[in-house]
Image (cartoon, rainbow, N blue to C red):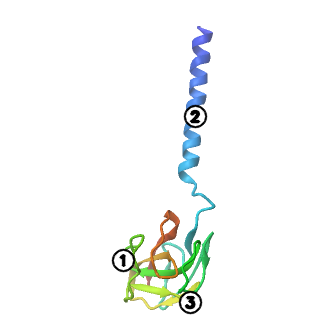
Amino acid sequence: MNVRKHTSRSAFAWMLLLLCAGLAACSSSPDPKQPRVFFTSPSDGATVTSPVKITMDAANFIVEPAGTVRPGAGHLHIMVDTDAVPVGQVVPKDEKHNHYGQGQKEAELTLSPGTHTLLLQGTDGAHVALPGEGMTQKITVTVK
């Protein structure tokens, strides 16, 4: 057996393994320093009764009343059965877009029986959708 050939193959295998592990770590872990918004309850896939009690929070993002636009701060909106508002656009005020402009982190939504998609979105003090992968979170709930 050629020792040199065997050593080269072993070294290549280890390098390939380390490269794959490094790429997996980079792609699967969100940056803990980036701002993000999230539901604390209900959990994704939960069966609930109406009115649905919702709690939400944020990390690396200050939740405060609307009115002042400042970096790293804003307030939350819950969209019901609709998509996120595109970055840079103002969240509309209608039955599918619920505004929490007083800086609330708790809400109650009256929802009809069935399956609903809830989307939490962080905005600035002027209700403008903010950039960042973590500035939205979507869950699905089933109302009995």
Query: Can you identify the residue that label 1 sits on?
Result: 82
Query: Helix or strand or loop: what does disc 3 sit on?
Result: loop
Q: Residue 62's quadrant in the figure?
A: bottom right
Image spot of residue 122 (x, y percent): 51, 75
Please rate how many residues cluster around mark 3, counting C-alpha atoms within 10 Å: few if below 14, some from 14 to 19, many from 20: few
Q: Residue 93's quadrant in the figure?
A: bottom left
Cα–Cα gap, marks 3 and 1: 23 Å
- For residue 17, the mark is 2
Does residue 106 appear in the picture of this structure?
A: yes
Front-lying residue, 30 or 69: 69
Q: Amino acid at mark 2?
A: Leu
Query: Helix or strand or loop: what does disc 2 sit on?
Result: helix
Q: Residue 104's quadrant in the figure?
A: bottom right
Cα–Cα gap, marks 2 and 1: 42 Å
Image spot of residue 133 (x, y percent): 49, 63
Q: Amino acid at mark 3?
A: Gln
Image spot of residue 106 (x, y percent): 58, 86
Query: Helix or strand or loop: what does disc 1 sit on?
Result: loop
State left or right for residue 92 relative to residue 122.
left
Q: Which residue is farthest top?
A: 1
Query: Can you identify the residue that label 3 sits on?
Result: 102
